[in-house]
Amino acid sequence: MSALPHPGADASSAANDDDTLETQEWLDALEAVLDREGPERAHYLLERLIDQARRSGAHIPYSPNTAYVNTIPPHLETPHPGNLEIEERIRSYVRWNAMAMVVKANKLNPPDGGDLGGHIASFASLANMIGIGQNHFWHADREGRGGDLVYFQGHSSPGIYGRAYLEGRLSEDQLLNFRQEVDGKGLSSYPHPKLMPEFWQFPTVSMGLGPLMAIYQARFLKYLHARGIADTSNRKVWVFCGDGEMDEPESLGAISLASREKLDNLVFVINCNLQRLDGPVRGNGKIIQELEGEFRGSGWNVIKLIWGGYWDPLLAKDKEGILRKIMEDTVDGEYQTYKANDGKFVRENFFGKHPKLLEMVSRMSDEDVWRLNRGGHDPHKVYAAFAAADKTVGRPTVILVKTVKGYGMGRAGESLNPTHQQKKLDIDTIREFRNRFNIPVPDDQLEALPFFKPADDTPEMQYLHERRKALGGFLPSRRTVAEEKLTAPALDTFKAVLEPTTEGREISTTQAFVRILTQLLRDKTLGPRVVPIVPDESRTFGMEGMFRQIGIYAPEGQKYVPVDKAQVMYYREAKDGQILEEGINEAGAFSSWIAAATSYSSNNRIMIPFYIYYSMFGFQRVGDLAWAAGDMQARGFLLGGTAGRTTLNGEGLQHEDGHSHVFSSTIPNCVSYDPTFAHELAVIIQRGMKRMVEDQENVFYYITVMNENYAHPGLREADIEGINRGMYMLKEAAGGKHRVQLLGSGTILREVMAAQDMLQEDWDIAADVWSVTSFTELRRDGLDADRFNLLNPTDTAKVPFVTEQLAKHEGPVIASTDYMKLFADQIRPFMPRNRGYRVLGTDGYGRSDFRAKLREHFEVDRRFVVVAALKSLADEGTIPMKTVAEAIKKYGIDADKANPHYA
């Protein structure tokens, strides 16, 4: 073993050493322990010494940082087992194809002008790491072994396409149509499973979401294994992030969970090229040191890969620690500047900081100095870091890899601030790129920028295919349907909530949901596949009975006796627990839901996740994750609990949801419902399971449920179709001089039902009541019909479902919901011709009060429904306008109060 450097990591510590002999004795003793007993014993002794010093009163502050050098010293590096020369050539071809793809796309001259965009620089810095992973580490899914899951850095997509082209998975025509997807033959700008469903596994370019989702994905693999559903013991989750991306709160938001649950199947690779999109990440600091502190402090195994092998001789000569000191003191902004210049500049400005450093490199040419490489561009170092991460047991690993953004792009973009946006290269830069990477494209073809692919019988192509064959096949690759077949339960499985409730046994739709879920859990086939997910509100939703029944997943079980052990529904954690209880953490819970909702693809196991949460803290808080779930073709149920702006009395402005259905309607494959009754909920869930579990359709459901208790009328067979399509006649009126159509959803439907009686009794007006389970689905159906009619003018016109239903009944239409007016206003274009449509809603901020007062405040209660109905009749001339004024006076409505929707 080589001798340890002089005390400390830098020259200043040596200068302050009062007893160098004693120091050397301690270092010699430590070296002997390392040599004879290994690093574990040395670590143990050091920890004991520090502990003893602290117990004796010495103040020894904790430092999360190590020296600014590689974590793995050269003599401990695992040797690279492959053919480095061939791998370098393959990597160069991939670099060329990635660059050519972006540049060619931006040479196009479309009629409307503008560029397609694209990124060269990110993959340029990552190419070495992607190549090492593809050739040696990342297993594809095959018989007897699940595949590894790789979250590729979103901006590196051209490089992934470039390799897939060499592999024969993508055609030249597809590369020529990079970012030109509308005609169905192009490649998506970034990783998008929705757009390339058999290729990309995960959407990652919405920065910060990839790291967060990956942590819960790794955790879900452990969950599946613990519950005996799938053997995931030999699978890894690899996550490529940018150093600038780590500023997103989501990127670091769950790293403590990863260490707490010992996710040794998780590897983060953070590409520290020191640049964001517009400039340096930490121009005045050191992002690698900062991230090391974050991850080490959270219990991760941290591997720093900073310097390439050309630095090893210099570091070996650095007996006084001067080079290490300069490395430590130099800030990232300086490192970026060095790589934007040349060897002479580096000699003068980096090594010139100390005369002994200048002497150290005095026999090196400027070219030699310039060749001093960063760790991410050294295949030996990258392989060693990946191998160490792959073997780590008991905790997650992060590899902090220093690279150059735009590596190989020369003066056109290497390490420059505008590099991220670089998508056009001039002919001189292309020639320089060609020469640097030895691409066999002659000068007379450079203008055409041809893609390069060696013949199938060349050593490069044979090696490329041999490596992927050894690892099970190509990657990335995505499964679109699970091989297993599951059958949805029959509707009568939920008969307990299909019958009318008797007097005194009123329930809420939340309670109905819990009964449905409980029944599902009893199913011998489907029960184990149900994944109940809650943030920290099980008792709010009446789910605490499940604690004892199925347990809360905890990888180490329950090490304590719960305080409520004597109760029937005590808090029980278990190694094979079924509930995922994520604490006060909606983003984490949603990420767990995504992992379960895409398990059919990632794990070949259909899971049925039910995530219930305060509806206000759903789409509003984690809307970006919900959009990503749509991109990932998630399948599962989201339950917005305590939904509506007036049902959660007493909580107030930040808790009352009047807009989650507006948000959910923006996601094309999110099917949304706002049911009022238990039987509606059962019909919707059963149909959802048929679509997602049995038919494996790529949709997910958002269903709002309330905590207000009331009677439920029970299911009529004839209403099933209407419940699923979005509306059905709940109660048809009899008699009356005039007629109106009243629409309602959720808890406000009961106000509409009360308004029906008031209209009949007070004004002799017949009001038909419709339960609208989904204004959103009605709108989508209407838009489909409208588009068909636009494009097929000579065919028989399609009639939207809502139009067809309302056309059978006379009178203006009034809708009242517990959501913004925009929610019910969605279907306005599909009203029957010459039919008035008035909408009541809860626009504005919430308040805390009793439900009746809140509904009065927002003007959605029964009295306002009646007044709206009368006004609609008066507007069409059916009744005199004075009748409306009489009703306002009769019901004590204050016409002069401030508009609650803006107040």
Image: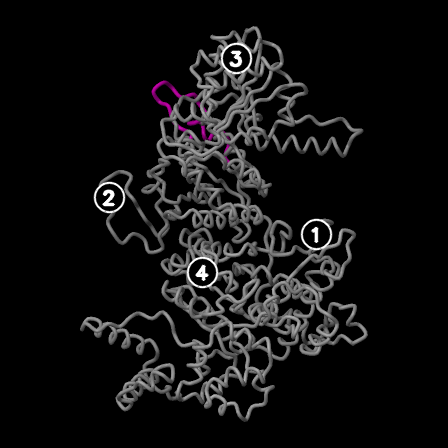
- Give the alpha-carbon distance from disc 2 to disc 3, as whole Å: 60 Å
**N-term mark: 3 or 4:** 4
The front one of 561 and 1 is: 1
Q: Mark 3 points at which residue?
A: 884
Question: Disc 1 residue type?
Answer: Glu
Which stretch appears magenta?
Answer: 489-509
Where residue 145 sits: x, y (%)? 52, 60
Q: Residues within 10 Å of mark 1 (few under 14, many from 20)?
A: some
Residue 565 badge: 2
Question: Disc 3 residue type?
Answer: Val
- Give the alpha-carbon distance from disc 1 to disc 2, as whole Å: 58 Å
Q: Residues within 10 Å of mark 3 (few under 14, many from 20)?
A: many
Residue 233 badge: 4
Where residue 130 sits: x, y (%)? 58, 68
- Dot 4 falls on a residue whose secondary structure is loop
Question: Disc 4 residue type?
Answer: Ser
The front one of 713 and 104 is: 104
**N-term mark: 1 or 4:** 1
